[in-house]
Amino acid sequence: MDLFDRLRAARPDAWAAYVEHPFVAGLGDGTLPEAAFRTYLVQDWLFLIQFARAYALAVFKGRNLADMRRAARGVSAILDTEMDLHVRFAAGWGLSETDLEQADELPATTTYTRWVIDTGLRGDLLDLQVALAPCIVGYAEIARALASRPGALAAANPYAPWIAEYSGDAYGEVAVAARAHLDELAAHALTEARFEALADVFARACRLEADFWEMGWRVRMP
């Protein structure tokens, strides 16, 4: 197993709370209330802003130029591409860029993103990448599982475009690269004594991801 699989196997309950949340099931069968998805879209845009800051921290934490350049590409991808794509996707759900920019972070967004950044500040690049991994790799895992379900990618499912985006080859390559980077970092910095602490970081990130789903599941936008 690679490091991601080892971490997932070490904390199965936290992983299950994330990937088996009712929000995820609702994406797959199209029953998720639209208001819940709009709430998620707004908060995910705000999340991306903090995600870019986490990648900027990864530049600082880089062990060498290769690490720094990899993290810098991540910052650029978020700020120059992903956020614009998110704006266009949100427009299809009746959300303008002004709606996104003027929205306040909900507590789950603040708690999750600031914890990721704090984890990176307190630890090294491996700590930070483990904190980010459930989001980066997890979305690919979730979307691929959903895509295999009958009807998930059908036109009748309003969430089919979301599933298609994260189960597609382009995002799959991002997830594969993130897993490989974890293994590369682990080869230099992981000891068996440290593994349990990293598994705890992984579990906390998974549970914060579950809380992020729950925020959309429970909070309804008008």
Image: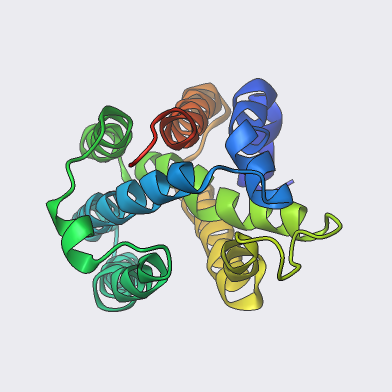
Residue 76 visible, this angle: yes
Q: Relative to residue 179, is residue 91 drawn left or right?
A: left
Q: Is residue 133 left or right of residue 157?
A: left
Q: Is residue 87 above or below residue 201?
A: below
Q: Quadrant of residue 77?
A: bottom left
Point out residue 110 in the picture as x, y percentages from the top left corner. 24, 34
**Residue name at image x 65 percent, y 73 percent:** 168
Furthest residue in direction left, as rendered? 102
Instruction: From the viewer's side, name the closer residue of 7 and 115.
Output: 115
- Residue 195 drawn at (x, y percent): 54, 28
Q: How is the image coloured?
A: rainbow
What's the residue at 23%, 35% (across, down)?
Answer: 114
Q: Residue at x 75, y 59 (%)?
A: 152
State the image quarter where residue 211 is shown.
Answer: top left
- Residue extending furthest toward the right: 150
Residue extending farthest to the front is 222
Residue toward you, 99 or 24: 99
Q: How many marks?
A: 0
Q: On screen, 10 above or below 136? A: above
Q: Residue 123 location in percent, x, y?
A: 29, 35
